[in-house]
Amino acid sequence: MNEDDLNTLFDAARAAPAPVPQALTERVLADAAAHSPTATGGWRAWLAALGGAPGVGGLITATCVGFWIGFAPPAGLPDLAGLVWGIDTATLSETDTDTGLFGWDIEEG
């Protein structure tokens, strides 16, 4: 057999597709409906999509830790905020407000 013979056979098979029994179609659709998630709206759907209460708790914890490390890095880590802004935050004085510091410098003083 060469490629032309195969193409002829495939064309003949495409011309007369095998009919799918109606009972099989109904069983497949019923099985798909049984395994499909139900549509619940509101905040519970968002909570479930995030992994439930443990997932949301992990996200809150990661957010708090990231915020803390971002603005008060440990001594072994570089100050990422200073690197992004192009300043050395270790040498800032209390009166230096060029960077803004989000107003937190006012609360300390």
Image (cartoon, rainbow, N blue to C red):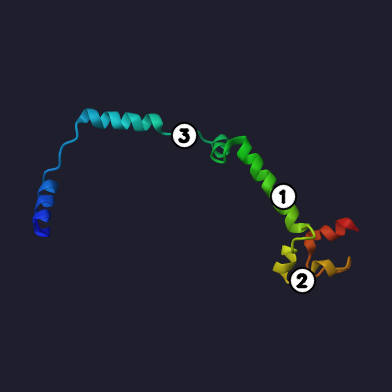
Residue furthest to the bottom: 86
Residue at 86%, 59% (x, y): give it. 106
Q: Quadrant of residue 47?
A: top right
Q: Which tag is nearer the camera, tag 2 or tag 1?
A: 1
Dot 1 falls on a residue whose secondary structure is helix
Percent coordinates x, y for residue 84 in the rendering: 70, 67
Using a 10 Å C-alpha cutoff, classify the residue at mark 1 as few (fewer than 14 neighbours), some (14 to 19) or many (20 or more).
few
Q: Which mark is residue 87?
A: 2
Q: In whole angstroms, how far apart are the C-alphas of marks 2 and 1?
A: 23 Å
- What's the residue type where badge 2 is placed? Ile
Q: Quadrant of residue 29?
A: top left
- What's the residue type where badge 1 is placed? Val
Q: Which tag is nearer the camera, tag 2 or tag 3?
A: 2
Q: Which mark is residue 65?
A: 1
Q: Quadrant of residue 28?
A: top left
Dot 3 falls on a residue whose secondary structure is loop
Residue at 72%, 63% (x, y): give it. 80
Upstream in the sequence, badge 1 or badge 3? 3
Percent coordinates x, y for residue 75 in the rendering: 80, 60
Upstream in the sequence, badge 2 or badge 3? 3
Percent coordinates x, y for residue 61 in the rendering: 69, 44
On the rendered image, what quadrant is the N terminus found in?
A: bottom left
CB atoms of marks 2 and 3 within 8 Å: no
Question: Circle 3 sits on which residue?
Answer: 39
Residue furthest to the right: 109
Percent coordinates x, y for residue 44 in the rendering: 57, 34
